[in-house]
Amino acid sequence: MKNAPQLLVGLALAAGLLALSGSAQNARAPQADLDQRVEALENELVAARAELVGLKQEVEAASARMERVAKWADAQAKAADGLAKALDEAERQGFTAGINFESRVTLLAGWRKALGEAQKGLEEKPAAAPAKPTRR
């Protein structure tokens, strides 16, 4: 039993070495897991950026289309107003007088109703497109 203290020291040293080697393996495992998670997040970021670029292009295209439609609608309203004025002038000049004048009165009333409908809802101009963001 003379060697008992040496044996205990040896066993303690062996246990300590085993504990250290186990913790080193455990330290590598979380690092590998962390590396995988970082790589997955980087891939998600790349995909999100690509989706953002696509969405930005869609918004720009929709804004341009909306601007063209607004200009077209404004032109239609102006044309309807011009036609309504022409109908008024034709009536003032006697378009509805004469034989079967009621048919011309009906025609003018129908045109005016259609022109009124074509101009409805255009009192409010669409909101201006938001300013395009500048790059930093």
Image (cartoon, rainbow, N blue to C red):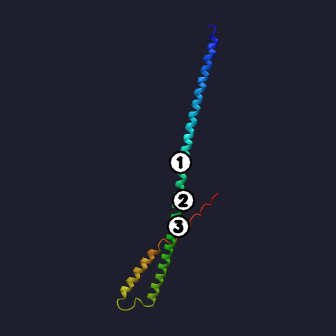
Q: Which mark is residue 56?
A: 2
Q: Is residue 114 above or below residue 56?
A: below
Q: Residue tagged by mark 3?
A: 64
Determine whether label 2 and label 1 are within 8 Å by CB: no
Q: Amino acid at mark 3?
A: Ala
Labelled pair 3, 1 in contact (Cβ < 8 Å): no
Q: Is residue 58 above or below residue 26?
A: below
Q: x, y percentage for residue 98?
A: 37, 92
| Crowd tier of the residue under label 3, counting other residues whose Cα lies within 10 Å: few below 14, some 14–19, many 20 or above | few
Per the rendering, the mark at residue 1 is none
Estimate how packed mark 1 is, as few (under 14), some (14 to 19) or many (20 or more) residues with alpha carbons within 10 Å. Answer: few
Q: How far is mark 3 from mark 1, CA to CA?
A: 30 Å
Q: Residue at x 50, y 67 (%)?
A: 65
Residue 136 drawn above or below residue 7 = below
In this orientation, which residue lies closer to the viewer: 61 or 67? 61
Task: From the image, tell me which residue sits under label 1.
Answer: 44
